[in-house]
Amino acid sequence: GAVVSQHPSWVICKSGTSVKIECRSLDFQATTMFWYRQFPKQSLMLMATSNEGSKATYEQGVEKDKFLINHASLTLSTLTVTSAHPEDSSFYICSAREWGWGGNQPQHFGDGTRLSIL
Amino acid sequence: GESVGLHLPTLSVQEGDNSIINCAYSNSASDYFIWYKQESGKGPQFIIDIRSNMDKRQGQRVTVLLNKTVKHLSLQIAATQPGDSAVYFCAETPNTGNQFYFGTGTSLTVIP
């Protein structure tokens, strides 16, 4: 159980293109999803917390107009990298927490999206 | 943000030996901790968690120890196998929020 699916797994596109990444919880409902960015041989950096039915909460230093997040349902959050440039190339990973449980629960991660901007 | 760090960035162990991976955290309000394993090109995979009201928790071949006095967390892997080779992250969350913050990561290499 607790499977998170991320799509696409790899994107290569030209500079200036906008790219949408989907994150789905397949067998549970998630009121909260998280988006991370990871550079090679580095840790995961939390970008934003995506809340179903409300605006995302962005971490300090993350441009909300650059990284648009939509969490329209309890099983889907999307991250759109707008007008992507080579410096946006990275590994983007989403995670989700199960809904309805009291107390802390682990986050379940997707397998990430490798974004390469030429 | 939070400060969660690991003492050793790399660790090499012989197959069959036990591995110990350490993690320090700085937020005394943290009350939930998780160890994740990340293989190359994949997302982190849950290994084991522990809450702040515990100091030890055991899983299959893994044990997590929590020392709140010195804000230290460790992951012990018994009889390490080649399939255990990966990067291991600790993550912590304070009791006031949803977010998890990840440590630097330790790359574990198991030598056959």
Image (tube, coloured by chain):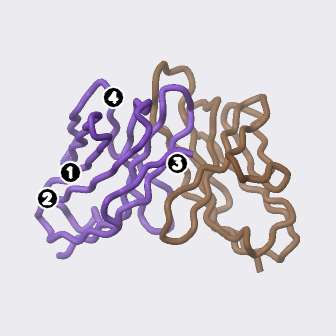
Chain colours: A brown, B purple
Query: For the residue carrying disc 4, how many other residues have a C-alpha within 10 Å: few (<14), some (14-19), or many (20+)?
Result: some
* Residues behind callouts 3 and 1 on a single chain: no
Q: Nearer the viewer, mark 3 or mark 1?
A: 1
Amino acid marked by disc 1: Gln
Q: Earlier in the sequence, mark 4 or mark 1?
A: 4
Image quarter hosting the N terminus of chain B: top right
Disc 4 marks which residue?
B52
Q: For mark 3, give the secondary structure.
A: strand
Residue at the image position 34 percent from the left and 46 percent from the top = B47
Task: Please tell me in which quadrant of the rendered image residue B10 appears.
Answer: bottom left
Residue at the image position 85 percent from the left and 63 percent from the top = A18
Residue A1 appears in view: no
Image quarter hosting the C terminus of chain B: bottom left
Residue at the image position 48 percent from the left and 19 percent from the top = A102
Q: For mark 4, give the secondary structure.
A: loop
Calculate the distance from the C-alpha at mark 2 to the C-alpha at mark 4.
25 Å
Q: Is residue A20 left or right of residue B38?
A: right
Q: Is residue B104 left or right of residue A69?
A: left
Query: For the residue carrying disc 3, how many other residues have a C-alpha within 10 Å: few (<14), some (14-19), or many (20+)?
Result: many
Query: For the residue carrying disc 2, how many other residues have a C-alpha within 10 Å: few (<14), some (14-19), or many (20+)?
Result: some
Q: Nearer the viewer, mark 3 or mark 2?
A: 2
Q: Is residue A29 left or right of residue B73?
A: right
**Position above or below: A44 against A69:** below
Disc 1 marks which residue?
B76
Q: Nearer the viewer, residue B106 or A34?
A: B106
Amino acid marked by disc 4: Ser
Disc 3 marks which residue?
A109
**Position above or below: B26 against A41:** above
Query: For the residue carrying disc 1, how many other residues have a C-alpha within 10 Å: few (<14), some (14-19), or many (20+)?
Result: some
Q: Earlier in the sequence, mark 1 or mark 2?
A: 2
